[in-house]
Image (cartoon, helix red, strand yellow):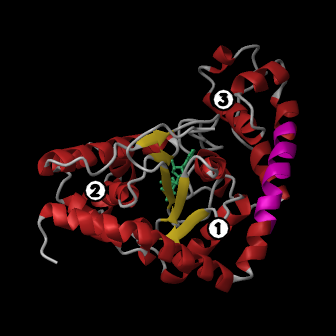
C-alpha cells in the first residue's frame, strides 16, 4: 500500500472516472481496485464520477444519468465505503468548473496541443471536436487541485495529464508568488496499469471501443466473460519460462497481466506458475478467476441499480462534504488572483 509522505499538505487522494459508458475491466484494475486499496488511515480519499468530462463528447441525457448512477454502483460494489471516502459526481460540486476556468487561463496553448489523448480522441477530424475536449486536462487539473490532492491513482494513459496538472500548479504558484497548490504525485502501480483490448494488444481496453468483444464490462455475466476470454486474440505459442519471453507477445502479456492483477500477484509469479501452458489451459483458468472476482461485483451493482434514490442520496451527501473542502480553497484562489468579493 502507498504510504503518505510527510508534507505541508494533508495527505489526500482524488481520482475520477467518466460516466461515458459502462465500466470496463480496464477501469476496474487500473483505477477502482486501486482506489479501494488507498482507503484507510493514511489518506483522505475523494472519488468522483466526472460527468462534466463525459459531455466533451455528446451524451444522450437519459443514458448519461444511468451511466453516472451505474458508475456509482460500481464504486460501491467494488468496495468504496461512502462513509470513509467522499463519493461525488463532479457537476454537484461547482467549484471544479470554477477552478477549471482559472486553470484555462494558466495553461498554455502549446502545452494543450501536446496532449496525446486529445489527438487520439479527436482523431482525424480535430476541427469538429468540442472546445471542451481540447480543454479537458485543465478541468482535470482543477478536479485534483480544488482539494489540494497530494496523490492521484490512475492508469498509465493519464500520466501526461498528471504532468500537466503539476505544470499548471507550478505556473500558478510562480505567477502569483505563492506556495498554494501542491505538486500532486501520480500513483500508477499494480500489475495492470494499462489493460489492453482483447482483440488488439496494441490498443487500450476502452469503454467506447465499438467492439464489445474488445472489453470485459463490469456488468457482464459469467457466460459473457467466458466467451470474451475464450475468443481473446492470442498466439499459438505456450506461455514462456520467463517474463522476458512475452516481450513481443502483447496479447499474451495482456492476459498474464490481467491474471496477475485479479489474483493480487505479479506477472512474474503468474509466469512461474503457468510456464509451458497452452492458452487452451491458461484461458479457462483465467475465466474461473475472472468470474470468481467479478461476479460478486456485477451482482451487487445490479442490486444497487434497483435503488437509484439511495445512490442519489450518497452523491448528495458526498457533494456537501466535498464542498466543505473545495469552497475555502476556491475562495483563497480568488483572493490570490485579485477577485473582489
Ligand atoms: N485500459 C485501461 N487500463 C488501465 N487503466 C485504465 N483506465 C481506463 N482505461 C484503462 C483508467 O480508468 C480511469 C478512468 O478513465 P476514464 O473513464 O476517465 O477515461 P479513459 O481513460 O478515457 O477511459 P476509457 O475507458 O478509455 O473511456 P473512453 O472510452 O470514454 O475514452 C483512469 O484512471 C484511467 O487511467
Distance from the alpha carbon under mark 2 to that under mark 3: 33 Å
- Residue 143 got which mark? none
Q: Count residues near mark 1 (Cα–Cα under 10 Å), then give few for <14, some for 14-19, many for 20+.
A: few
Q: Count residues near mark 2 (Cα–Cα under 10 Å), then give few for <14, some for 14-19, many for 20+.
A: some
Q: Quadrant of residue 102?
A: bottom left
Q: Of the residues tagged 1 and 2, which is closer to the observer?
A: 1
Q: Secondary structure at mark 1?
A: loop
Give the image location of residue 202, x and y in percent.
Answer: 53, 36
For the record, the magenta segment spans 285-299
Give the image location of residue 204, x and y in percent.
Answer: 54, 44
Residue depicted at x 53% and y 67%: 19
In this view, the residue in front, 285 or 323, is 323
- The residue singled out by tag 3 in the image is 253
Residue depicted at x 61% and y 67%: 71
Tag count: 3
- Residue 126 got which mark? 2
Amino acid at each position: 500500500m502507498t504510504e503518505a509522505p510527510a508534507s505541508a499538505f494533508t495527505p489526500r487522494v482524488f481520482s475520477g472516472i467518466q460516466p461515458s459508458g459502462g465500466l470496463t475491466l480496464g477501469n476496474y484494475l487500473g483505477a477502482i481496485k486501486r482506489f479501494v486499496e488507498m482507503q484507510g488511515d493514511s489518506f483522505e480519499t475523494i472519488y468522483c464520477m466526472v460527468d462534466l468530462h463525459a459531455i466533451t463528447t455528446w451524451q444522450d441525457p437519459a443514458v448519461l444519468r444511468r451511466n453516472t448512477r451505474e458508475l456509482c454502483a460500481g464504486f460501491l460494489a467494488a468496495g468504496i465505503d461512502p462513509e470513509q471516502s467522499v463519493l461525488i459526481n463532479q457537476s454537484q460540486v461547482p467549484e471544479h468548473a470554477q477552478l477549471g476556468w482559472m486553470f484555462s487561463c494558466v495553461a498554455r496553448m502549446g502545452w494543450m496541443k501536446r496532449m496525446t489523448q486529445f489527438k487520439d480522441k479527436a482523431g482525424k477530424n480535430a476541427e469538429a471536436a468540442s472546445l471542451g475536449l481540447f480543454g479537458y486536462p485543465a478541468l482535470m487539473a482543477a478536479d485534483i487541485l480544488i482539494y489540494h490532492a497530494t496523490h492521484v491513482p490512475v492508469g498509465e494513459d493519464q500520466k501526461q495529464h498528471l504532468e500537466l496538472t503539476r505544470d499548471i500548479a507550478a505556473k500558478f504558484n510562480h505567477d502569483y508568488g505563492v506556495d498554494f497548490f501542491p505538486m500532486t504525485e501520480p500513483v500508477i502501480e499494480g500489475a495492470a496499469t494499462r489493460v489492453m483490448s482483447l482483440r488488439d494488444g496494441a490498443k487500450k481496453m476502452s469503454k467506447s471501443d465499438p467492439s464489445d468483444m474488445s472489453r470485459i464490462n463490469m456488468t457482464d455475466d459469467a457466460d459473457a466473460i467466458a466467451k470474451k476470454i475464450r475468443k481473446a486474440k492470442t498466439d499459438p505459442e505456450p506461455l514462456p519460462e520467463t517474463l522476458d519471453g512475452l516481450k513481443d507477445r502483447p496479447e499474451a502479456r495482456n492476459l498474464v497481466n490481467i491474471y496477475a492483477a485479479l489474483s493480487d500477484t505479479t506477472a512474474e509469479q503468474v509466469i512461474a506458475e503457468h510456464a509451458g501452458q497452452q492458452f487452451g489451459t491458461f484461458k479457462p483458468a483465467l475465466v474461473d478467476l475472472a468470474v470468481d472476482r467479478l461476479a460478486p461485483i456485477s451482482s451487487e451493482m445490479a442490486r444497487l441499480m434497483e435503488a437509484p434514490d439511495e445512490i442519489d442520496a450518497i452523491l448528495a451527501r458526498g457533494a456537501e462534504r466535498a464542498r466543505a473542502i473545495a469552497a475555502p480553497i476556491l475562495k483563497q484562489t480568488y483572493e490570490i488572483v485579485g477577485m473582489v468579493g
